[in-house]
Amino acid sequence: MCLGIPMQIRSIDGLVARCEAKGVVREANLLMLEHESLAVGDYVVVHLGYAMDKVSAEEAAAAWEIYDQMLAAEEAVEPQAHESR
């Protein structure tokens, strides 16, 4: 399963944005959102290096809350999987 990751735009150079999420910085192509009004500080959902959608700060935070819960659940299950081997 592939997930789009909400990231905050830190800088824009043409159709390329430098984005950050949880301390990780990546470049994202803005071609799919070229008709959107995008600025530094905005949030976009990035998938496979492309910004797919503009989202609010609240939507980005809600998505990260869910992702954090998923990661915590995976970590809770993973030790049990190793014990059964």
Image (cartoon, rainbow, N blue to C red):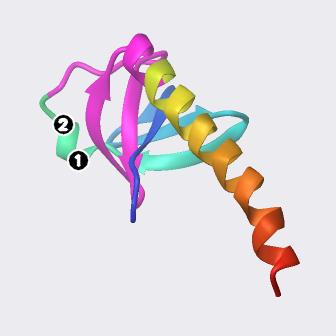
Amino acid carrying label 1: it is Leu
> Percent position (x, y) of residue 65?
55, 27
Amino acid carrying label 2: it is Glu
Dot 1 surroundings within 10 Å: few (below 14), some, or many (20 or more)? some
Vertical placement of residue 17 versus 65, above or below: below
> Percent position (x, y) of residue 58?
42, 12
Residue 43 left/right relative to 19: left
Where does the magenta region start and end?
36-60
Residue at the spot x=31%, y=23% of the render? 55
**Can residue 11 be seen in this snapshot?**
no
Query: For residue 52, what is the image quadrant?
Result: top left
> Percent position (x, y) of residue 31?
23, 47
Residue lying at the far front of the rendered structure: 84
> Percent position (x, y) of residue 39?
38, 18
- What quarter of the picture does the C terminus occupy? bottom right
> Which one is nearer the viewer's eye here, 63 or 80?
80
Asked which secondary structure carries label 1, the reply is helix
Asked which secondary structure carries label 2, the reply is loop
Mark 1 near mark 2, Cβ–Cβ under 8 Å? yes
Residue under label 2: 34
Query: For residue 83, what is the image quadrant?
Result: bottom right
Vertical placement of residue 32 versus 41, above or below: below
Residue under label 1: 31
Residue lying at the far bottom of the rendered structure: 85
